[in-house]
Each structure stands twice: as structure tokens, then as C-alpha cells.
Amino acid sequence: MLGWALLFLVVAIIAAVFGFGGIASASAGIAQILFFIFLVLLVVSLVMHFVRGARR
């Protein structure tokens, strides 16, 4: 999922360079949403790892 966020970020940068404002802002928004979803999943994964590790 982080790869998709980086892909949309690159698309946003390229679109901004060529002056496509709508495409750039949409791609940047998608990249930002995917990045935050990745961060939430990372935190949940780390919490689950420490909770499972404490039981063993």
C-alpha cells in the first residue's frame, strides 16, 4: 500500500509540473489518504505484535 501512495505522489508531482492542477490535487489527495491508512495499519500491527509477544 505504501507503494501505491508513492506512485500517486509521483503522478501528482509530474501532473503539477505540466500544469494539470486537478489531476495533481486528486493524486496528492489519494497519496495522502493511502499514506495515513498505511500508518494506521502499521500502528495496529505493532500493537498486536507486542500484545501477542507479552502472552508467550
Image (cartoon, rainbow, N blue to C red):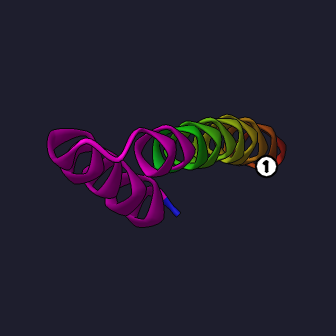
Residue range corresponding to the magenta coloring: 2-26
Task: Please identify the quarter of the rendering in which residue 2 is found.
Answer: bottom left
Label 1, residues with CA under 10 Å away: few <14, some 14-19, many ≥20:
few
Q: Which of 48 and 27 is in front in this view?
A: 27
**Residue type at mark 1?**
Arg
Instruction: Identify residue for label 1.
Output: 52
The mark tally for this picture is 1
Predominant secondary structure, magenta span = helix
x, y percent for residue 24: 41, 44
Residue at x-position 15% and y-position 41%: 17
Apparent side of residue 48 relative to residue 46 in the rendered image (left or right): right
| Image: 40 above or below 14 | above
Q: Left of 50 or right of it: where is 11?
A: left
- Horizontal side, residue 15 vs residue 26: left or right: left
Q: Residue 31 colored magenta?
A: no
Q: Position of residue 35 (x, y in %)?
A: 54, 41
Foreground of the two, 39 or 28: 28
Q: Where is residue 50 in the image (x, y as percent from the top left)?
A: 69, 37
Q: Which residue is pictured at 53% across the width and 64% down the height?
A: 1
Most distant residue in the front direction: 19
Q: Residue 22: within the magenta?
A: yes
Q: Nearer the viewer, residue 22 or 8?
A: 22
Please tell me which residue is depicted at 28% across the width and 51% down the height of the picture: 15
